[in-house]
């Protein structure tokens, strides 16, 4: 009976047999691959891989937010946003499915989707191929890939000499799940209505 | 005489806007077809010296903080070059907006006043005397007379007096279709040229017709080049 059930189990990566005859509670093998705790994405594979190493909050592509976002960590928006978004000392990525109708302020902005609104990036802004940005840009450095659509003005603001750009906060040693706690991103409801 | 509806194009001549069925000789056959939108997969044609560009930057080089309008869409090279001179750059993808408004192969009549008004609001909606220079490139060749007149009139309004515009026109009047390019500034007098496709020009101009077109402006200066491209500096 046991043998039969074992046959039905999916194939697992090889792990060396434990020398202990009766192992007791199961301890994960050191070479067993770690499973991601982040939500599974349904985006096409190989097109866009958000950086997870430093920890970043994610607004998924099925999410729409109307209001203000203040982020104290890197933020990926792959859904819809109307309002404002500020990540003054962090990186803001608008994913390929992201649509942002908002004033944007961040240390670094990477656009792969659509932004309609003025963008202020203290360090740099990247407008990737197939991205669309309609609005005025203020930044120290701009990168525009061929195939990107941009309509608006560009103001290059050189950082003052001697004044180092704000450095991102060191990533917490906590597990990846911690970076997705709601406390890191404050979403204020839209009070304009 | 202009006939209405589907008969409209019958009397339009070789420059009237019916896209050629056959690819243009010498052009990439894939690109001889008219794209549904401007595709940025470009063929780098090469670099060319540009006296017109040199002259244009000669006027703005020693100043800083000017506001320059680029009608060729945003490219990394142009953004870097102009912002490194200390100027503010406005970018408009003029041909993309033209295609979105009137269709790639003149599916919508360019003499429709409502459409012209809509187009101007999309592409050139700026306050009076906003700009200190305009890089027009070759986009005016694709406009039919009513739209062209409206665009030139609007440019005259939004550019500050005594400022300059740089425009390119093909000088071979027998062309049936011309390549449309992305111009990337490499140096003060050197451009990298990338071909995006071919398109039938709505009009072709000689010096006389260009002087007439920019009759409202203070002066027009021509630079004839070897590659049958006429560079024009227009002083507002």
Image: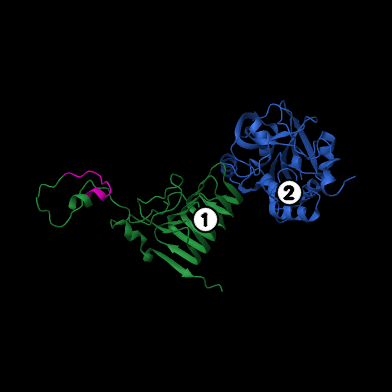
Q: Residue B102: which disc? A: 2
Q: Position of residue B19 (x, y in %)?
A: 75, 38
- Would residue A159 be seen by someone viewing this image from the given angle? no
Q: What chain is tagged by disc 2?
A: B
Q: Residue A120: which disc? A: 1
Q: Quadrant of the C terminus of chain B?
A: top right
Q: Position of residue A166 (x, y in %)?
A: 41, 54
- Queried whether the magenta region covers residue B146, the answer comes back as no
Chain B: its colour in the image is: blue
Q: Position of residue A5 (x, y in %)?
A: 22, 52
Disc 1/disc 2 C-alpha distance (Å)? 33 Å
Q: Residue A105: which disc? A: none
Q: Quadrant of the N terminus of chain B?
A: top right
Mark count: 2
Q: Position of residue A113 (x, y in %)?
A: 52, 52
Magenta region, mostly helix, strand or loop?
loop
- The residue lying toward the viewer, choosing from B23 and B69, is B23
- Queried whether the magenta region covers residue A7, the answer comes back as yes
Which residue is at 61% across, 41% downward?
B39
Element marked by disc 2: helix
Q: What chain is tagged by disc 1?
A: A
Magenta region: which residues? A6-16
Colour scheme: by chain
Asked if residue B109 lies left or right of residue A30, the reply is: right
Chain A: its colour in the image is: green
Q: Residues within 10 Å of mark 1 (few under 14, many from 20)?
A: many
Q: Are the numbered discs 1 and 2 placed on the same chain, yes or no?
A: no
Element marked by disc 1: strand
- The residue lying toward the viewer, choosing from B88 and A189, is A189
Q: Residues within 10 Å of mark 2 (few under 14, many from 20)?
A: some
- Would residue B10 be seen by someone viewing this image from the given angle? yes
Q: Nearer the viewer, mark 1 or mark 2?
A: 2
């Amino acid at each position: 009976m046991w043998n039969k059930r074992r046959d039905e189990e999916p194939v697992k990566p090889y792990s060396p047999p434990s020398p202990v005859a009766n192992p007791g509670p199961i301890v994960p093998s050191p070479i067993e691959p770690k499973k991601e705790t982040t939500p599974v994405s349904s985006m096409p594979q190989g097109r866009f891989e958000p950086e997870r190493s430093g920890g970043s909050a994610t607004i998924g592509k099925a999410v729409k937010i109307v209001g203000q976002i203040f982020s104290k960590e890197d933020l990926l928006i792959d859904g819809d946003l109307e309002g404002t978004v500020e990540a003054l000392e962090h990186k803001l990525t608008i994913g390929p499915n992201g649509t942002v109708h908002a004033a944007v302020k961040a240390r670094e902005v990477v656009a792969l989707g659509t932004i309609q609104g003025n963008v202020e990036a203290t360090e740099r802004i990247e407008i990737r191929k197939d991205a669309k940005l309609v609005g005025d840009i203020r930044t120290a450095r701009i990168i525009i890939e061929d195939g990107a659509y941009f309509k608006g003005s560009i103001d290059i603001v050189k950082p003052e000499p001697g004044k180092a750009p704000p450095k991102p906060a060191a990533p917490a040693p906590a597990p990846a799940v911690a970076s997705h706690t709601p406390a890191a991103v404050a979403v204020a409801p839209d009070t304009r209505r | 005489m202009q006939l209405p509806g589907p008969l409209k194009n019958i009397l339009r001549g070789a420059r009237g806007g019916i896209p050629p069925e056959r690819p243009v000789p010498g052009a990439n056959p894939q690109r001889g077809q008219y794209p549904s939108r401007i595709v940025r997969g470009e063929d780098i044609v090469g670099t060319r010296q540009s006296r017109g560009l040199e002259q244009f930057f000669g006027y703005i080089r020693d100043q800083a903080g000017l506001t320059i309008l680029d009608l060729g869409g945003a490219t990394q090279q142009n953004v870097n070059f102009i912002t490194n001179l200390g100027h503010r750059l406005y970018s408009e993808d003029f041909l993309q907006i033209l295609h979105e408004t009137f269709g790639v192969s003149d599916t919508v009549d360019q003499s429709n006043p409502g459409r012209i008004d809509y187009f101007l609001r999309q592409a050139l909606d700026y306050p009076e005397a906003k700009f200190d220079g305009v890089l027009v490139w070759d986009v005016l060749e694709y406009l039919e007379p009513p739209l062209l007149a409206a665009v030139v009139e609007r440019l005259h309004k939004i550019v500050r007096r005594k400022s300059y515009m740089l425009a390119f026109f093909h000088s071979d009047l027998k062309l049936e279709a011309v390549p449309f390019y992305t111009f990337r500034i490499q140096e003060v007098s050197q451009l990298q040229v990338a071909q995006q496709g071919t398109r039938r020009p709505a009009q072709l101009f000689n010096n006389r017709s260009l002087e007439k077109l920019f009759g409202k402006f203070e002066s027009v200066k021509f630079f004839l080049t070897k590659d049958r491209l006429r560079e024009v500096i227009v002083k507002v």
